[in-house]
Image (cartoon, helix red, strand yellow):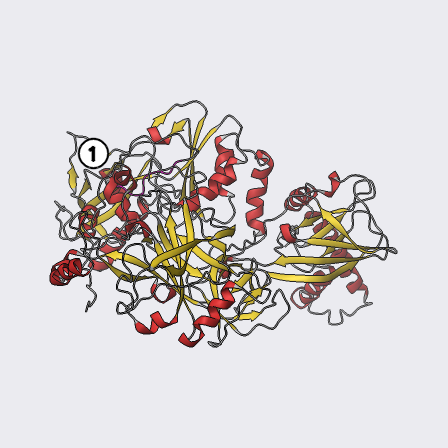
Amino acid sequence: MPIVPPRLDDRSFDDLVDELVARIPAHAPEWTHARPGDPGRALLELFAWLTDTLLYRANLIPERQRLAFLRLLGVQMRPAVPASGLVGLSFDDVTTTTAATLRPGAALKANMPFETRSELTVLPVAAEAFCKRYITQAERDSLRGVLSGLHRVYNLPAEPAPAFYVTTPVFPGGAADPRGVDVISAVDQCLWIALFAPKKELVGAVRQDLSEGADGQPRAISVGVAPAVEVPALSEDIGPRARIPHVWEMTEPDEDGEPAFHPLSVIADTTRGLTARGVVRLLLPGKGKIGASPNDVRAALAAGVGDRPPRLDDPERAARLVAWLRLRPTERLQRLALTWVGVNAVEIDQRRTVLGRVVGQSDGAANQEISVAATSIERETFQLEVEEPQAGYQPWRLIDNVALAERGAPAASLDTEAGVLRFGDGVRGRVPAAGSRVRVARMRVGGGSAGNLPPGSLKEVASVASIDGKPVGRLKVTQSLPTLGGQDAETLAEAEQRIPAALRHQNRAVTADDYRRVAAETPGVMIGRVDVIPRFLPQQRRDDVPGAVSVMVLPWKAIWRPPNPRPDRPFLEAIHAHLDDRRPLATELYVIGCEYVRLGVGVGIRVRDGFGREAVMNDVRDALYRHLWPLPPGGSTGTGWPRGRSVRDREIEVAVAQVPGVDEIVGVSLFTAPDSVVTAPAPAPGATFAASSAGLSARAAAAYASGGRAAPRELASTGGPAPTSAEASVALRPRWARIEPRGSQAAELTLRLWQLPELTAVVIDADGNVPADLRGAPAVPGETGVAVPVVPEVC
């Protein structure tokens, strides 16, 4: 919406007259004919006119004047941000054997508009991902006789020991794994994607169509990749990441019984080398170069052995196998975790495309404004055309401010949030000739938080157009990942708070307040807290370093319960990219999270008569979590617990005493875990760094960040072993140590400049005793117990 100054009093002249007439019975009951033309009525109308004049002048000040001034400065409100995501498309007709290449902008069926962002070739195949999983010790013990038999069958040497594996589905049913599947943990450190035909009778036709389309040229396959989102460690560089060295390969028909692989050329890659969610578009091999190794051990005894693709023991799947697609790292990696991988994938966003809309006609006046009848417009794809005499529609370009246009330049400015075009005055920019029609050749509009949909919300394509104009059958949508990033358009109240700051910092970050405000304005992220630590070097824990600026950011979280909010890599990268373009050249900028120190609290109270015991205990627990919460409205001032401020037992007593129903506070005990702070070695120089992922040891921090499965980067870099599920579980339940008061001083948890407390255990005794330990405290959400593997049936 455009900036419309509010009216302090919106009563009109007629409203004032009606109000005066309504007061007549109360003040002059003998006056019964206050109709128009009556002398008394004329007097009332005179005073109503005088009052209306006063209200008109009152509505001009002071807020109206301020907003009008800001509007003259050209300050615009922010448009809505569209949600985006990845989906896979497939043919609904299982007899289809011909691929279809779709134009960008295919619309998906939903309660709100979603469109594909790029061209897509929908291949007549279904895909399933597999990996060669090491057999567990339990499987090894139960299959000891079988393994010794395999040694003899394949004549395997004793050294090196063979790596026995089980072909294990990855992302079964197309479902994403939020914790991520580590490709490096497989036997061959590869991810295998099986391409299946709809029916076994169609395998030959599908292979032929993949290798040579209707034009005789090889097809392209689109592979969607979503890397696992991790909480960065303190020493981890979160600037632009280096691309992961890898290669995509497709199986060819075996040559003399040996497997053959064809490296695929990358046409386009929006994953930036497997470091971001996106699509990799690959060129398939030519005619006769697509095939698969046999899976029947009766026909090929070496099926699945060595570098061959995983063996499929399901005859139905094996009969429909068209080819294997392999993702293989080309250098030694410590970890490559993926949340989801699928084929026929395309990026979508919450927008719709409008083509050829005539939005108005020029009246020949200078500085005229024309509405395009749409809001929240994508500026990059907006195409403007203006009708010119004897020339038809001609393209006009967009500029940020039409006042800066050259004389007679065919240019206009666009308010993307309000959808308003502004033209020049003839001196600064050309004035469209009177009677000329203004047309929007193309624009994409939409956005908002309503587009953040869970997986499975999008199921069908509404409208589609192919590149060659041929009809396309019905397409199904597989949405394995949620759509993220949607934000509503800025409200007038939000703009009033932001615009004065924008005028002060002028889109430059110089002072600490500038960094705080500019970081908070990062589009596409929900920021809960921004702290600026001047002259602080995070990777060395040093302060008073000239030229260094650290910006500590935390994402928004509405529930006051552990685990505390932690920034992930995309969150930090987005804020760093937004700040990096606005910092002074000589400033060393770091965007970091915080380091949490685990805290446990034991409180002994007595409940006042007339109050429920359990209700008071729950209220005390809520008060403690709120008091120590790092985001607003936590803390004593409502802005979150201050960074680096120590936690004292007497402050805890004050917070508990304010809870209704607490009659007496017997005492407060503070506990901390000896290994509750991550200590990481100093890293190599980099652009930005993230703070520790949890208030734990290095091993426990990595396990906490990934649900107890990830190998910690600190240990992996030195060749140390990854923790097991049992080790992660033990590490996540720290050994609590009570903080004893020193003499007459209060018990205190001391925090450093970059640290915040994380209250993870609360024990309340309502019988007048002070808890001496934290037994009985509920487990922190996200902690996992000892993992019990389910051994698959093996014939």
Q: Position of residue 525 (x, y in %)?
A: 47, 48
Q: Secondary structure at mark 1?
A: loop
Vertical position of residue 356 compared to residue 235: above or below: below
Q: Main secondary structure of the magenta part?
A: loop
Instruction: Identify the image quadrant of the C terminus.
Output: bottom left
Q: Residue at label 1?
A: 746
Q: Residue furthest right?
A: 390
Q: Is residue 737 magenta?
A: no
User: For this view, does 704 lie left or right of residue 409?
Assistant: left
Q: Nearer the viewer, residue 42 or 531?
A: 531
Residue found 48% across the figure and 58% down from its top: 285
User: For this view, does 93 lie left or right of residue 647?
Assistant: right
Q: Position of residue 316 (x, y in %)?
A: 33, 74
Vertical position of residue 500 compared to residue 141: above or below: above
Residue found 52% across the figure and 30% down from its top: 510
Figure quadrant of residue 166: bottom left
Residue 658 in sight from this viewpoint: no
Instruction: Identify the image quadrant of the N terminus.
Output: bottom right
Q: Position of residue 527 (x, y in %)?
A: 44, 46
Amino acid, disc 1: Ala
Vertical position of residue 740 compared to residue 459: above or below: above
Give neighbour class at mark 1: few <14, some 14-19, many 20+ (Cα, 10 Å). Answer: some
Q: Nearer the viewer, residue 522 or 62?
A: 522
Residues rendered magenta in the picture: 689-696
